[in-house]
Image (tube, rainbow, N blue to C red):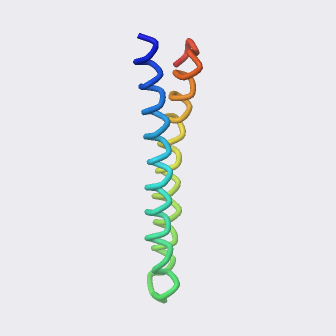
């Protein structure tokens, strides 16, 4: 049973890190066009901040839960 909990904790951490990476890619994909587009650049910058932040905020609990599972915390 302990091995299963360790694997699950590692998967949660990997999922959170993958979410961080994906949110960074989404952030950059919306931010890069602002350098070439004059009209609508504010919209792309706003969407980059919003979508990147949402991805980061949704990834943080996964990493925390994975850490808790690896350390055998009762709250995890």
Q: Is residue 73 above or below residue 36?
A: above
**Relative to 59, does residue 31 appear above or below in the rendering?**
below
Looking at the image, which residue is at 45% across and 87% down?
37
Classify residue 22 as left or right of residue 72: left
* Whether residue 36 is situated above or below residue 8 in the rendered picture: below
Q: In which image quadrant can residue 12 be found? A: top left
Q: Is residue 71 left or right of residue 43?
A: right
At 52% from the left and 21% from the top, the residue drawn is 69
The x and y percentages for residue 38 are 48, 89
User: Residue at horizontal 50%, vertical 50%?
Assistant: 20
Q: Residue at x 45, y 63 (%)?
A: 25
Residue 3 is situated, as x and y percent measured from the top left of the image, at 44, 17
Which residue sits furthest front?
Answer: 3
Number of callouts: 0
Picture coordinates of residue 33 (x, y %)?
45, 80
Foreground pick, 15 / 26: 15
Closest to the observer, 32 or 73: 73
* Residue 51 x %, y %: 45, 58
In depth, the one of 18 and 41 nearer the eye is 18
Res 68 quadrant in image: top right
Tell me: 73 left or right of 22.
right
In which quadrant of the rendered image does the N terminus lie?
A: top left
């Amino acid at each position: 049973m302990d091995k299963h909990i360790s694997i699950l904790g590692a998967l949660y951490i990997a999922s959170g890190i993958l979410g961080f990476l994906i949110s960074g890619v989404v952030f950059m994909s919306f931010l890069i066009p602002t350098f070439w587009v004059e009209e609508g650049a504010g919209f792309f910058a706003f969407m980059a901040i919003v979508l990147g932040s949402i991805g980061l905020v949704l990834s943080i609990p996964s990493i925390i839960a994975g850490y808790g599972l690896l350390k055998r915390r009762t709250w995890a």
